[in-house]
Amino acid sequence: MTKTVLITGASAGIGKSAAVAFVAAGWRVVATGRRVERLDALLAALGADRLHPAVFDVCDEIARDAALARLPEGFRDIDLLINNAGLALGTSPAQQADFAQWKTMIDTNVTALASLTHKLLPGLVSRRGAIINLSSVAATYPYPGGNVYGGTKAFVEQFSLGLRCDLHGTGVRVTSIEPGMVETEFTLVRTGGNQAASDALYHGAAPMTGDDIAAAMLWVAELPPHLNINRLELMPVNQSFAGFKVARAD
């Protein structure tokens, strides 16, 4: 039986890679995102029989619900929810941060993720489906400037564990995937389009790619139904833990 996955943030980066990987593996994909031209390009590449683009901002619940209500036959029964949409904004220390950026990260990474999960849970339970939430190593390892972004990803990790508790006995699987450095548009978004900053971050680091994380998601999704991966942390070999810092007086 062909299964259906709904992937948020599928217009770029990890979400786009996931859409390609799941279609190649025989899944139907509901690909959500805000940028209609990018979703249209994905549709043209992958075909309407396997991919349905759903254009909405995950923070807009009215638009989201309308898009879900319009899902065509064959894409309505969601077997897997991949909560991929999210972002980091700003690199300033907390005392200098833009509070509007903090709110946007919380609205997107926390509130929208929880809201969509709540919306789809009844169907996922009835179908003994699965949820994959995209967290980050920032949920575990703090770094300067990570402040609210790391906090939102810690929420995703803990929310995933909480879902596992509440869904005990339903057959629904829940996984938190927690990547380190992945070269996507992530840093461009974080820095307001600073290509030089993005290039400098990834230069010589052999970072992971969106395809790497998509392959991990597909592996988790296609495990036998009696197996659950609770947390999956991934880093490129060239990235490791920063260690403790000590500020010394002159």
Image (tube, rainbow, N blue to C red):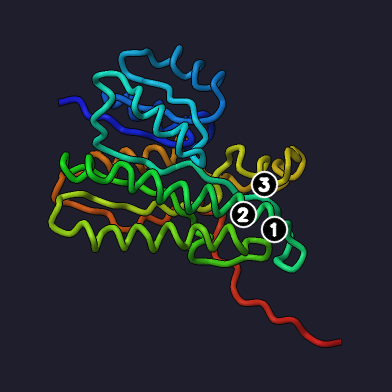
Q: Secondary structure at mark 1?
A: helix
Q: Secondary structure at mark 3?
A: helix
Q: Quadrant of the N terminus?
A: top left
Q: Is residue 43 left or right of residue 104?
A: left
Circle nearer the viewer, 2 or 3: 2
Q: Measuring from the top left, give residue 141's x and y in whole percent.
A: 53, 66
| Residue indicated by mark 2 | 103
Residue visible at 61% across and 37% down? 185
| Residue indicated by mark 1 | 99
Tell me the kind of residue under disc 3: Arg
Neighbor class of circle 3 (other Cα within 10 Å; few <14, some 14-19, many 20+) is some
Tell me the kind of residue under disc 2: Lys
Q: Secondary structure at mark 2?
A: helix
Mark earlier in primary sequence (1, 3): 1
As drawn, 157 above or below 35: below
Tell me the kind of residue under disc 1: Phe
Q: Nearer the viewer, residue 206 or 51?
A: 51
Q: Measuring from the top left, give residue 167's x and y in whole percent.
A: 21, 56
Q: Measuring from the top left, give residue 119's x and y in whole percent.
A: 33, 43
Q: Nearer the viewer, residue 95 or 216?
A: 95
Residue visible at 33% across and 23% down? 71
State how far apart marks 2 and 3 are (Cα).
14 Å
Answer with the quarter of the image where residue 166 lies: bottom left
Q: Quadrant of the C terminus?
A: bottom right
Tag 2 near tag 1, CB within 8 Å: yes
Residue visible at 46% across and 46% down? 112
State how far apart marks 2 and 1 are (Cα).
6 Å
Circle nearer the viewer, 1 or 3: 1
Neighbor class of circle 2 (other Cα within 10 Å; few <14, some 14-19, many 20+) is few
Answer with the quarter of the image where residue 198 lies: top right
| Residue indicated by mark 3 | 190
Mark earlier in primary sequence (2, 3): 2
